[in-house]
């Protein structure tokens, strides 16, 4: 396939943490889109934006996305605004717009900018619009009072400038198509997709190769818990006590506990990025003045004022990944005049996420119940997404199905690959969510 010719379909796994694109190759397969440039990280494009003021830019604010957003932010953290995991507010009626350098940005505004930069960094492979785009969407959206209809409206506005057919498909069904391409015999499979914002399950019956419609979905379920929630647990247990959580402040003649709202915002990427504003900083400084122990609140202010959110969460992500390989890992962070050093045991991390694991397991059981199947009827379990590498996650499936039935691989790319395969089918709308 000519790199600059229009493909029949583009599969786009727009994820909370990472985004991956794949083009149908016209031969029954697909090719991942590798991004091009000094900051490129192969086919994985970080779902992040960085904004900075620039006179010549639209409304005086310029932006970049993916690994280039990270590089821009690290070069000038105090003169830029870094936004990550913005997909997590897609379905939230509580989110209307973010104020960045005094300009309002709705979800769809950020989404359009993100897609523009993704196309620009694709080395020309996405310059010719495909005939259709198949976009992955979670079975259950993240966020409080999640509204799927609102998310669909925002997604439609985000993708409208492509001017082509857009089909939305549950993300684990994309992974199911990807896994089906490995199988040479019929099977009933359970796909578990562990993303940044949600964990989704689909049960699919796969027919023999050559069958007109090889994959038939039987049931889906999901829960708004995944990698970002695990990060929040680490922040909550390891970092926030050093920033004043659990502390007290003086109010007239009373000693009260410091309100938890600030700590909830700090532990949520979608809100932490917006905390660097005059009103929030002034409130925190008043709280610091009245705190029984003002030093921890001072640390929080320093981290926000010096734009240390990304480095802090990067350190959290590193220790989480290290705990997938070791029983003990070192947490190290230094920035904005704040230093945090601690040893973290896998057993402690698993205790912190125990309630989340129970809800994930319940969602898996719900998929089996909807399909009317017992565990013994599942021939294969395909685990995908970064958090599928966490031992406590793997243990859920080992216990329920047996390790011999579990497969994994392409943790960050399988969904995009499968979405492109769906897009190449005569009627991909059969798979539409």
Image: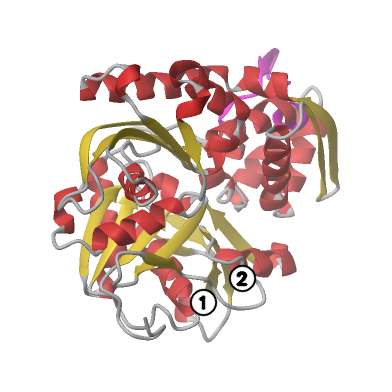
Based on the displayed image, in which of its 4 quarters is residue 149 positioned? Answer: top left
What residue is shown at x 45% (from left), y 83% (from top)?
A: 124
Tell me if residue 175 can be seen. yes
Tell me if residue 245 can be seen. no
**Residue 12 relative to residue 291: left or right:** left
Secondary structure of residue under mark 1: loop
Magenta stretch in the rendered image: 239-261
Image: 70 above or below 190: below
Disc assigned to residue 121: 1
Q: CA distance from mark 1 to mark 2?
A: 8 Å
Q: Residue 223: where, in percent of width, then height? A: 38, 30
Q: Residue 332: where, in percent of width, then height? A: 83, 41
**Residue 242 relative to residue 383: left or right:** right
Q: Residues within 10 Å of mark 2 (few under 14, many from 20)?
A: some
Image: 405 above or below 79: above
Q: Are marks 1 and 2 in contact (CB under 8 Å)?
A: yes
Secondary structure of residue under mark 2: loop
Based on the displayed image, in which of its 4 quarters is residue 362 positioned? Answer: top left
Disc assigned to residue 154: none
Give the mark nearer the N terminus: 1 vs 2: 2
Q: Is residue 249 magenta?
A: yes
Q: Is residue 257 magenta?
A: yes
Q: Nearer the viewer, residue 93 or 121?
A: 121
What residue is shown at x 54% (from left), y 61% (from top)?
A: 44
Q: Nearer the viewer, residue 227 or 187?
A: 187
Q: Look at mark 2 in the image and give the residue it sits on.
A: 40
What residue is shown at x 58% (from left), y 32% (from top)?
A: 230
């Amino acid at each position: 396939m000519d790199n600059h010719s229009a493909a029949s379909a583009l599969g786009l796994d727009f994820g909370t943490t990472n985004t991956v694109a794949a083009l149908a190759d016209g031969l029954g397969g697909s090719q991942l889109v590798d991004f091009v440039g000094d900051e490129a990280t192969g086919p994985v494009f970080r779902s992040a934006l960085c904004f900075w003021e620039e006179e010549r830019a639209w409304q005086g604010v310029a932006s970049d996305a993916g690994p280039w957003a990270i590089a821009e932010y690290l070069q000038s953290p105090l003169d830029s605004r870094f936004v990550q995991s913005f997909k997590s507010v897609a379905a939230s009626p509580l989110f209307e717009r973010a104020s960045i350098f005094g300009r309002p940005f709705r979800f769809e505004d950020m989404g359009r900018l993100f897609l523009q930069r993704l196309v620009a960094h694709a080395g020309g492979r996405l310059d010719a619009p495909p005939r259709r785009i198949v976009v992955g969407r979670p079975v259950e959206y993240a966020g409080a009072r999640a509204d799927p209809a609102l998310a669909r409206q925002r997604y439609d506005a985000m993708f409208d400038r492509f001017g082509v057919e857009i089909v939305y498909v549950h993300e684990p069904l994309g992974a199911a198509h990807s896994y089906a391409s490995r199988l040479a015999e019929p099977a009933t499979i359970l796909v578990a997709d562990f993303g940044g914002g949600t964990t989704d399950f689909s049960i699919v019956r796969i027919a023999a190769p050559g069958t007109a419609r090889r994959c038939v979905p039987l049931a889906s379920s999901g829960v708004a818990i995944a990698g970002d929630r695990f990060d929040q647990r680490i922040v909550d247990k390891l970092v926030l006590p050093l920033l004043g959580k659990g502390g007290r402040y003086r109010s007239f003649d009373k000693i009260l506990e410091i309100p938890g709202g600030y700590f909830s915002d700090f532990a949520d990427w979608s809100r932490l990025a917006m905390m660097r504003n005059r009103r929030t900083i002034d409130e925190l400084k008043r709280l610091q003045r009245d705190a029984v122990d003002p030093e921890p609140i001072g640390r929080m202010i320093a981290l926000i004022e010096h734009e240390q959110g990304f480095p802090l969460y990067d350190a959290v992500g590193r220790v989480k990944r290290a705990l997938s390989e070791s029983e003990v890992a070192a947490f190290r962070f230094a920035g904005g005049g704040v230093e945090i050093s601690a040893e973290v045991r896998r057993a402690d991390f698993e205790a912190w996420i125990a309630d989340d694991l129970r809800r994930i397991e319940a969602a898996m059981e719900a998929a089996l119940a909807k399909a009317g199947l017992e565990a013994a009827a599942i021939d294969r379990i395909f685990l995908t997404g970064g958090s599928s590498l966490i031992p406590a996650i793997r243990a859920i499936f080992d216990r329920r199905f047996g390790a011999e039935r579990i497969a994994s691989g392409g943790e960050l790319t399988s969904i995009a690959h499968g979405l492109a395969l769906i897009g190449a089918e005569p009627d991909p709308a059969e798979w539409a969510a």
